[in-house]
Image (tube, rainbow, N blue to C red):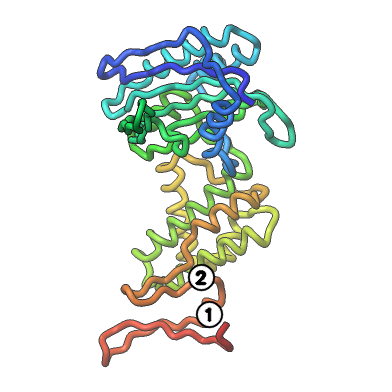
Amino acid sequence: MIQQCIIHRVGNKNNDDGVVLSDNPTTLSPELDRTLIKYFLQNFEGKEDTWNFIHVDDIKFNEVSSYASNIFLGADFVDISKKIAKYLYESSVHPNIKGGELFVAVLSNVMYDGKHVRAIGLFKSETKESFLKFVSTNDSLEVKNELGASVNRLDKGCIILDYSDEKGYYVFSIDGSNRTDAKYWTDDFLGIIPRQNEYTFTNNVLSMTTEFVSKVLPTQYPITKAEQVEILNKSVNYFRGNEFFSMEEYEEEVFKDLAMIDSFNSHKEAYKQEKNVELEENFAISESAVNKQRRKIKSVIKLDQNFHIYVHGGEQLINYGYDKERGMKYYKLYYREEK
């Protein structure tokens, strides 16, 4: 699957670390090929959210998109890979950015949308871990402590498919660092934004609803955890029970109360501004996005350190109260049989 691969070392420009450029592609044995495939692709498995390149003037001026296009068209791979490494260096100006090895790879037979397509992979290794290396001598084994990259962790990665529409190439991106300065990878270097489609529309509405129910509603209403879980379950059930989304129908079915709907709409506008996302009023629902969000939504009521109540439905069978004699809150659960 790896047709060509080359490795460059890219430092932090703010620290004047410089760039170390390779003049030849990496020689890949079958074993190394399998190891690198795992290293490059395992973190992308199951990802369905795609991105597209952007530029303030025109997408044709996006550097990484242009470099990818040149490679797809048959330009000199080593020369273009060096330009990519130099551009990453120019983008690495935040003082907290770690230097590391940049892999530029051409991949074949990448499956997407039922088709086998070519792809270009950009993968950066920043984090080094200790490992033990055993060396045989004449009469014994010696052990050395060395540093290297773990094949189980990819710090940053991008796969650019030779598959496009009016918005340009389809792009997948991951960032395993979770640092605030890491947006340089998506914003400054790649210049990409989440692609707007059914998956992102569904994901955005469910994420926004979860934030509203868990963080905003408790500040405005005397709402219990059980009632929060009930609303979130209604939200998920709406998406699971319909093929098409209607914001108006969704609000009425999930929240019902007009004051709560007004509050939801206010939060919706604030969420759009804060997250810089689009929240469409009508769209086809993505089942995979629903399943992903469903796993994130917490249907658990945690009571002190003693009890966890897992709620998968039947919220109307849960009563909430306060025992004055004990000075403690309580939940009362109604059920027909134990299982």
Residue 69, image x and y in percent? 60, 15
Neighbour class for label 2 at 10 Å: few (<14), some, many (≥20)?
some
Residue 202, image x and y in percent? 58, 49
Instruction: Give, as a three-letter code, the residue at label 2.
Output: Glu
> In the figure, 255 relative to 142: above or below?
below
CA gap, disc 1 and disc 2:
8 Å
Residue 62 in sight in this render: no
Q: Residue 71's image quarter?
A: top right
Residue 84, image x and y in percent? 47, 15
> In the figure, 199 relative to 186: above or below?
below
Residue 73 in sight in this render: yes
In the shown orientation, is residue 44 left or right of residue 321? right
Q: Disc 1 designates what residue?
A: 316
Specify the farthest residue to the front: 139
Q: Identify which residue is drawn at 64% across, 53% down.
A: 245
Neighbour class for label 1 at 10 Å: few (<14), some, many (≥20)?
few
**In this view of the protein, which residue sits in the foreground, 227 or 290?**
290
Q: Identify which residue is drawn at 63% across, 54% down.
A: 246
Q: Disc 2 designates what residue?
A: 230
**In this view of the protein, which residue sits in the foreground, 127 or 300?**
127
In the shown orientation, is residue 144 left or right of residue 54? left
In the shown orientation, is residue 139 left or right of residue 252? left
> In the figure, 163 relative to 60: above or below?
below
> In the figure, 173 relative to 228: above or below?
above
Q: Residue 307's image quarter?
A: bottom left
The N terminus lies in quadrant = top right
Q: Find numbered disc 2 in the image and state the secondary structure of the residue it sits on.
A: helix
